[in-house]
Image (cartoon, rainbow, N blue to C red):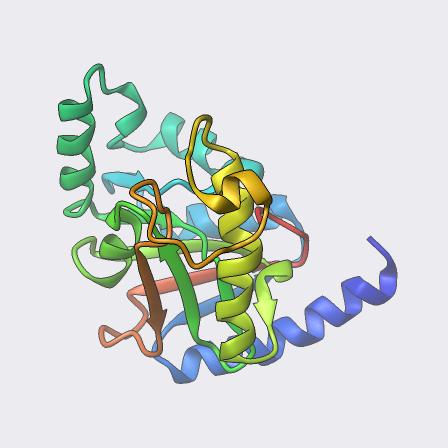
Amino acid sequence: MEQAEVLRNKILGETLIKNLNKRGMAAYYCATKEEAVAKALELIPETDVVAWGGSVSIKEVGLLDAIKKRNPVIDREIAETPEEKQELMRNALLCDTYLMSSNAISKDGQLVNIDGNGNRVAAMIFGPKQVVMIVGMNKVAGTLEGAIDRARHVAAPINAARFAGLGTPCAKLGTCADCMSPDSICCQVVITRISRVKERIKIVLVGENLGF
């Protein structure tokens, strides 16, 4: 990454932290993935039961591996049947710490997330005692409208491409078609303006590109 981009991310990160704080969220800026993992582990007690959504970012920084070694977890990937997976996803709503990223953040501190099943956004909104997000600075948009556009037209089509056999237009064309497909991964679009429980949502901003 060019030094000018590193500097820009730091300056923008400082502005974003102030705006997130005004909205009742705790926010931190880390220049590197390694710093981000250290900060996240600092925020999560070792006794916490931890669950997570389908986030590429928490895997990319190495947080998921670190948590699995250190904390009791609810891991839906170990399920042997669809029914067991659903039950684990429900149990995750009552964990101590929920890990995820955000599809986009507006410069004024609003979070935008799109979900298919809804388990990820449900946990973000209510249930777990705290939510810890790992968010690369590539997810930051200038306006709320820009953040929504990023979530729908950048994050969602790339996410759809991850799932083999998905029948949505975006999986086939690489762009959003505002579909109503049964396979849609855009069933819920959630804008988080404020964290009513102060600092329940904790956001670790990372000065690198993470996820999509």
* Left or right side of 48 for 3: right
Residue 56 visible somewhere in the drawing: no
Total numbered labels: 0
Question: From what the image shows, is residue 120 above or below residue 49?
Answer: below
Return the residue nearer the eye: 190 or 134. 190
Point out the residue furthest to the top here. Answer: 80
* Left or right side of 107 for 76: left
Residue 143 visible somewhere in the drawing: yes
Q: Residue at x 53, y 52 (%)?
A: 155
Return the residue nearer the eye: 212 or 45. 212
| Residue 191 rendering spot, x and y as whole percentages | 36, 71
Q: Residue at x 19, y 17 (%)?
A: 81
| Residue 110 rendering spot, x and y as whole percentages | 43, 75
Question: From what the image shows, is residue 60 above or below residue 138?
Answer: above
Q: Residue at x 39, y 26 (%)?
A: 69
| Residue 59 rendering spot, x and y as whole percentages | 51, 36
Return the residue nearer the eye: 11 or 83. 83
Question: From what the image shows, is residue 180 above or below residue 106?
Answer: above
Q: Quadrant of residue 112?
A: bottom left
Q: Residue at x 56, y 50 (%)?
A: 36
| Residue 106 rendering spot, x and y as whole percentages | 52, 75
* Left or right side of 30 for 167: left
